[in-house]
Amino acid sequence: LSQITETFSESVIREMTRICDEVGGYNLSQGFPDFESPKAIQEAAIRNIRAGFNQYPVTFGEPELREAISRKVAQYNHIQCDPKTDITVTCGATEAMIATLKALINPGDEIIIFEPFYENYGPDSILSGATPRYVTLYGPDWHYSSTELAAAFNKKTKAIIINTPNNPTGKVFSKRELEEISGLCIKWDTYVVADEIYEHILYDCAEHISIASLPDMAARTVTINSISKTYSVTGWRVGWAIAAPTITQRIRKVHDFFTVGAPTPFQHAAAEAMTFDPGYYEGLKNHYGEARDFILEALREAGFQCEYPQGAYYVLADASAIMMRLGLTDDTAFSRKLIELTGVATVPGSSFYADKVKGNRQVRFCFCKKWETLKSVAQALTTRI
Ligand code: GLN
């Protein structure tokens, strides 16, 4: 068997979902909603299946969807792109990321990843042959050190991955930070891979800025997104990568050999979802904003130390005090104990770090859940630990 995949451990996020399902717990581990996706998008999918969109799509994406993406990013992200040459539709942002890295990386190249990071980026780097270099995001406000960031760039740096709004920290990268990153990318002639899947999930005054919209950045940025989080359809597996034509040509080839195409009827439904009026996104944001405030209060009352995330739908909470009380010394043991005591499934913090010790006092809660779930979770956390 392959020596490369031998180093992989199973995704802890997906494993926790399985464990949670086995015990019938509250799944605050994997980031997906437990409420219905919008009726209009469900009906669009059914209508498109009945209309006969059941065979292979155009490998790099149905034209209707690429056109819809291009219009939406012009309106919301200040990104100008040509649907004919600059967009590849993939099986979720997950495939967009690995196909992009495969398209960019040569053996020996380095990629910069902010840590804590979304679990997949580690194996993605290894599969693409890159060596990851990690730059720490320091809590509680998840800032990075400019000196450490500048020191991570060198002649081997091929790309930097920016995930904003960020999973698992909820950090929303500011304009100043994105400008600083852009300056370094121009100086060292590196690409940016921007995973913007939580772009509409923002709190308080946080503003999402696409790094591709900054001066001189469009040509060196691959912007990744999907319909999963924005339209609450994580099982449909429709995502995309936007990049300059020369990069897109490579991504399209990798994507074609990987998966041929993302599900055809869901691509057509996605194109329709993109015509939702701005009120839809406001509604999503408002629901998650209330859910965030509610869960934060419950977590603090239960003894976790955590700050309000600025975006996305996760809280990376410090559990040191409770762990000490329970006599536990690592995050995995704590996560298991938490399910046992409260029925609440979380993701152990170490899953988001290359250096596992750094996350071993943290657990991630995902709060994209309906009120009924959130209320039961709050009740369990505040009374059963
Ligand atoms: N992004 C989600 C999370 O971090 C899950 C994505 C997935 O499991 N593919 O929980």
Image (spheres, rainbow, N blue to C red):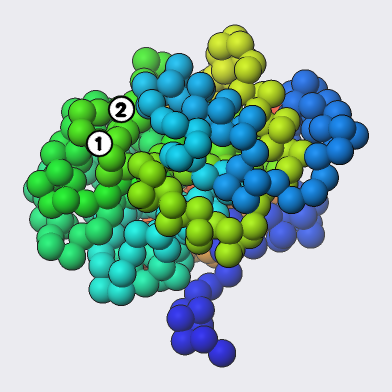
Name the residue at 35% across, 30% down: 210
Residue 308 lies in quadrant: top left
Which residue corresponds to mark 2? 213
In front of the other: 353 or 198: 198
Question: What residue type is disc 2 on?
Answer: Ser
In the picture provided, is 188 more to the left or to the right than 243?
Answer: left
Q: Secondary structure at mark 1?
A: loop
Residue 360 lies in quadrant: bottom left
Question: What residue type is disc 1 on?
Answer: Met
In the picture provided, is 231 more to the left or to the right than 305?
Answer: right
In front of the other: 22 or 306: 22
Q: Does residue 120 appear in the picture of this structure? A: no
Spatial separation of the CA atoms under disc 1 and disc 2: 7 Å
In this rendering, is residue 218 above or below 261? above
Q: Secondary structure at mark 2?
A: helix
In this rendering, is residue 126 above or below 187? below
**Label 1, residues with CA under 10 Å away: few <14, some 14-19, many ≥20:** some
* Image quarter in which the N terminus is found: bottom right
